[in-house]
Amino acid sequence: MIIEPRTRGFICLTAHPKGCEQNVLNQIEYIKERPVKEGPKKVLVIGASTGFGLASRITSAYGSGAATIGAFFEKPPKKGRTASPGWYNSAAFEAQAHKDGLYAKSINGDAFSNEIKAETIDLIKQDLGEIDLLIYSLASPVRTHPDSGERFKSVLKPIGKTFTNNTVDFHTGEVKEISIEPCNEEEIENTVTVMGGEDWQMWIDQLKAAGVLSENFKTVAYSYIGSSLTEAVYRNGTIGKAKDHLEATAFKITDSLNDINGKAYVSVNKALVTQASSAIPVIPLYISLLYKVMKAEGTHEGCIEQIERLFNARLYAENLDLDEAGRIRIDDWEMRDAVQAKVLELWKQATTETLPEIGDLKGYETDFFNLFGFKVEGVDYDEDVEEVVNVPSIKE
């Protein structure tokens, strides 16, 4: 099958297995050269198939030789229809990990459900006994509550008043004004239910009750703060309320882990092109300008570089540096005053005509297509490839 990208808005409807595989192999090679001293040995990653979750799994496995279990919810392939990119990523990771003698198994299903939690606990008991790190990197627009069965949907809206600012259609390069109507109280509550910390806490509570958390266990969830340019629709909007809840949950989890000397942290990460961030208005324009500035000063990082720095310079370093709210900050290079001032200056100049020069729209577009295995260096896209690829540990 010759596979080409087919896009609709901020998603790509196809994915390329060879491109996804090459992306994974590139990240593995990056981590092999940067081992994690005293890193984790038995790791569970919730949301392990793309972005920061995938980078966390790779860093755990190839940085410190950890056995990894990855949970995710991905669409498997059928003859004539590609899988979702996370499926191909996971297939490539597992295949390479097994080749390199590393334990790696995966579970595909709704991580919000009690069934997937129970299946994961059974696998840990059977194969690993316990885990010493859990990465929570779940990004979903909807959640079916495991107890009530009620389905909740998150929204990306400002709170209190209409938000109007510029954004860019990265497919066409058109910079245009966008207005987003404010949310209501129910939409805030629903977004917190989907994207807040309740499910993270449920995972920890059930794992602890099952006796599969090690002494000195750590867990990390990922968050974002961002700049003044995006705060109305992000940090001060509905999604920001969910992130506030997630961050408050870290303290509750730590309290619940006192008897095993366990700790829960939130890591605030840099703005990057992910399937989730592509859906947020204004963010594509901000990222294209941010990339231009950070690449010029040599501080740009992708997911794998961010997570390697999280593990080596924060989580498993001698001195875990936290901010005043108790968070790990690996968005520190993005949030430098000089970087933000330059981005703000460029923002004022950004038009359809100027953006190709003052921004890095090309970099944004390349990163977007890379998420789905397209535009990856070294891949022959004219080659006939097999779309049906299996994740070794998943029996369909």
Image (cartoon, rainbow, N blue to C red):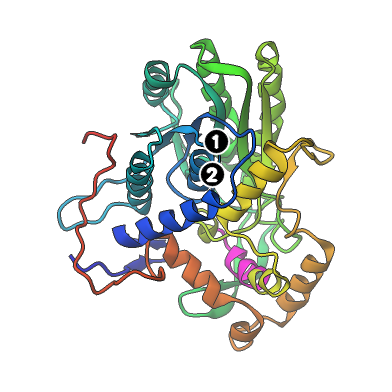
Q: CA distance from mark 1 to mark 2?
A: 14 Å
Query: Residue 168 location, x and y as percent?
Result: 56, 73
- SS for callout 1: strand
Q: Residue 59 got which mark?
A: 2
Residue at 41% from the left image edge and 61% from the top image edge: 11
Say left or right for 359 vs 149: right
Residue at 55% from the left image edge and 37% from the top image edge: 64
Which residues fall within the magenta stretch? Answer: 280-290
Q: Quadrant of the C terminus?
A: top left
At label 2, the amino acid type is Thr
Say left or right for 358 vs 48: right
Please rate how many residues cluster around mark 2, counting C-alpha atoms within 10 Å: few if below 14, some from 14 to 19, many from 20: many
> In the rendered structure, does residue 285 fall within the stretch colored magenta?
yes
Judging by the rendered image, the residue that carries numbered circle 1 is: 136
As drawn, which residue projects farthest toward the left? 79
- 8 and 86: which one is in front? 86
At label 1, the amino acid type is Tyr
- SS for callout 2: helix
Query: Residue 344 location, x and y as percent?
Result: 76, 71
Task: Examine the rendered structure and indicate whether residue 94 appears above or below residue 127.
Answer: below
Whether residue 97 appears in this view of the structure is: yes
Please rate how many residues cluster around mark 1, counting C-alpha atoms within 10 Å: few if below 14, some from 14 to 19, many from 20: many
Q: Residue 4 got which mark?
A: none
Say left or right for 91 vs 341: left
First of labels 1, 2 by sequence position: 2
Count of marks overlaid on the render: 2
Which of the 4 quarters of the picture holds residue 354?
bottom right
- 162 and 99: which one is in front? 99
- 7 and 309: which one is in front? 309
Query: Residue 325 location, x and y as percent?
Result: 80, 37
Q: Quadrant of the N terminus?
A: bottom left
As drawn, which residue projects farthest toward the bottom? 353
